[in-house]
Image: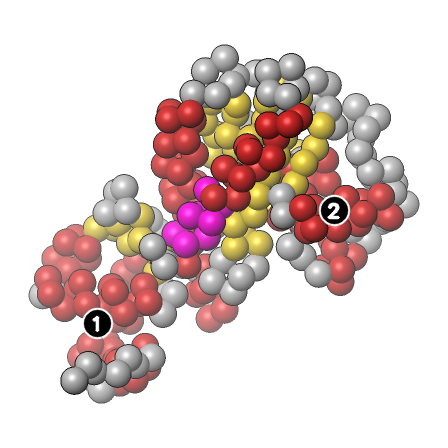
Amino acid sequence: MKRPSHSLMEELMSDIPAARNALRILKFLAAKGRPTRAAHIGRDLGIPRSSTYHLLNVLLDEGFLVHFPEAREYGLSSLLTELGSLSPGSDTVQMLATPIIRRYTTREKLPVVAFVGVLHGTDIKYVAKEVGPRAPTVVGGVGIQLPAHLTATGRALLAGFSRRQILALYPNRESFFSRTKLGPGNFHDFTTILEETRQRGWALEASEIAEGLASVGAVATDHNEQPAAAIGFTFRTDDIPEARWPDLASAAIEMSGELSKRLTGST
């Protein structure tokens, strides 16, 4: 007979040494400050190999850890922020997302720049970037911040917030910064763009960051189904006609879905 599944508490409280070792793993990864291989975790903590993998799988299933498949490493998830613990932050997003966007730009060989961004106040902060062949020179780069309301990645993230959250983020709603005299001029325009983004399922900007360039973006969510990051493409409008933009958006949605699975440990 198949054994019924249990929650993390039921699984661990039935075996106090296992509960202690699970907590030791979390403390160990928090102290390390970076993802670590299972073999190193077990060795440094003196936990048998089979027990280490069992505990890691339980912690993954319950959302406390994320798995980095390319590096075969485990790190803390954003769920621990609910317990007042450490957030994995942009470094974890970068490590999880970079292989995803690199795989795409290498395979498709399109003249696009792929970005991964996280929200930093009312800015989008880029944490990963991959450049396809003959891609344009763009304003954004890793570590660069741009106004979220003007970027596709920023709009993809903001569209996942409630109106109350948007009001809190933008207390000064009289005017919005513009780089090219395009984009929302006021709060009504801005919320209209966000609603269009929600209905479309992906975000768009055209010549609002730089003339002749456009971008599409899609959001990745965390364990609580809250916006956590966004993946987007920037390209010359002369290189990729408007009729093909939805195809790029579909790719961004697919990759953001993969990132969401990695962020929640469900891969």
What residue is rendered at 47% in x and 44% in y? Answer: 254
State whether residue 24 appears in this view. Answer: no
Q: If the image is split into quadrants, where does the N terminus sit? A: bottom left
**Coordinates of residue 10 in the picture (x, y in percent):** 30, 84
- Return the x and y of residue 159 as percentages of the image width and height: 68, 51
Considering only order in the chain, which callout, 1 or 2, is on the residue closer to the N terminus? 1
- The dot on residue 246 is none
* Residue at 21%, 72% in the rendered image: 21
Q: Secondary structure at mark 1?
A: helix
- Left or right: where 159 falls relative to 1: right
Nearest to the observer: residue 12 or residue 243: 243
Q: Amino acid at mark 2?
A: Glu
Apparent side of residue 180 relative to residue 107 in the rendered image (left or right): right
Q: Position of residue 157 (x, y in %)?
A: 62, 48
Q: Which residues are magenta?
A: 255-262
Magenta region includes residue 260: yes
The image position of residue 47, as x and y in percent, is: 13, 66
Of residue 147 and residue 233, the one placed in the foreground of this image is 233
Residue holding disc 1 = 21
Query: Looking at the magenta stretch, what is its main secondary structure?
Result: helix
Q: Name the element at disc 2.
A: helix
Marks 2 and 1 sit apart, C-alpha to C-alpha, by: 48 Å
Residue farthest along the front direction in this orientation: 243
Name the residue beneath numbered marker 2. Answer: 196
Q: Residues within 10 Å of mark 2 (few under 14, many from 20)?
A: some
The C terminus appears in which quarter of the rendering? bottom left
Amino acid type at circle 1 is Asn
Q: Nearer the viewer, residue 34 or 162?
A: 162
Image height of 147 relative to 122, above or below = above
Q: For the point 73% across and 40% down, which residue is it? A: 149
